[in-house]
Image (cartoon, rainbow, N blue to C red):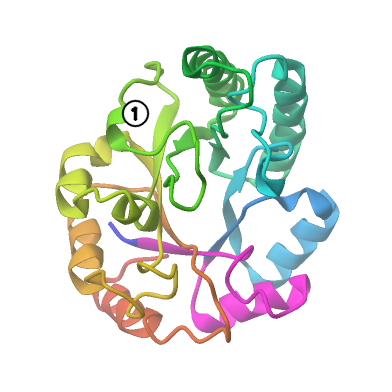
Amino acid sequence: MLKLSANLSMLFAHLPWPQRFAAARAAGFAAVEIQFPYEHTVEQLQHWLGEKQLKLVLINAPAGDLMQGGSGLAGTPGREAEFAAGLQQCLHYATALGVEAVNILPGRLSAGCSREQAIATLHGNLLLAADTLAPHHIRCTVEAINRHDMPDFLISTPAELQQLPEHANLYWQIDLYHMARMGEPLEPLLRQHWPRIGHLQFADVPGRGAPGSGALDFSALFAQIASLPYACWSGAEYRDTDGAVQWLQPLLAMQAMNGQQG
């Protein structure tokens, strides 16, 4: 099944935040995701979502200094208390806003830390997050990010995702852009591992632009996702310069023909 969401941290980013929700609805999206919503109050987000009748389907747990070039929280020994506090903040937002999935970013290998230590810390934090979110029926996802864009990232391939602990509420978050940048064959990945995927994202390669701007065959990829029993969301998370979403219209038409609700 192909259910499309707009990542408002990257799409329509030339607009002020309230206008991004309006632009997403006008483009035809019924759902959105936000990487880190914590600069806004829950009440602000409830208003913007409700005003445009949009569903917020995914947020990231706080990641500390990761986006500023640091190691982040989830895989950094000694920052477990910060991770747990951030998880509680995230849970407050997720439950108040009806979020379906929370993404945990593993982070980079920190200075002076062995990979084994970092992975052990990550395992513990992932299990805590999966346990914390499960009673609220919120999926816990963990994302693999390519090491070209983020050197020393702890988890970058499906093989590394497979080494993470088993938990009934721990899923993979697969961004087709990151997997393509790592040289992973996308069609076999989706076919073999869709039951483990709790959220998909996409952008074209190599520039992380909109579908059709690069080398990926999105007609085939979208058709494959639509044919799978996969029931979670697929988020458009690409570098958007002008808000144009020409790639979306054929998909919306296809969904309308099939009677599918986004």
* Residue in the foreground of this view, choosing between 139 and 143: 143
Secondary structure at badge 1 equals: helix
Answer above or below: position of 193 versus 11. above
x then y, percent, for residue 142: 47, 34
Above or below, 50 against 199 in this view is: below
Residue at 14% of width from left, 47% of height from top? 188
Identity of the amino acid at label 1?
A: Glu
Q: Count all numbered tags in the image, as a single digit.
A: 1
256 lies left or right of 192? right
Residue 33: give x, y in percent of width and height. 58, 57
Instruction: Name the residue located 32 percent from the left edge and 79 percent from the top edge.
Output: 212
Q: Which residues are magenta?
A: 3-30
Residue at the extreme front of the image, as rendered: 112
Q: Report if residue 142 lies within the magenta region.
A: no
For the point 71% across and 64% down, which residue is it?
50
Q: Within 10 angstroms of label 1, few (less than 14), some, or many (20 or more) residues?
A: few
Residue 258 in the image: above or below residue 137: below
What residue did someone put label 1 on?
160
Give the left or right position of residue 251, taking residue 16 as reference: left
The quadrant of the rendering that contains the C terminus is bottom left
Specify whether 78 is left or right of 10: right
Q: Nearer the viewer, residue 124 or 51?
A: 124
Percent position (x, y) of residue 8?
62, 65
Q: Identify the image quadrant of the N terminus.
A: bottom left
Q: Nearer the viewer, residue 1 or 165?
A: 165
Percent of width and height locating residue 78: 71, 14
State yes or no: residue 23 in magenta: yes
Q: Quadrant of residue 71?
A: top right
Q: Quadrant of residue 79?
A: top right
Is 257 rendered above or below residue 184? below
Q: Is residue 108 left or right of residue 173?
A: right
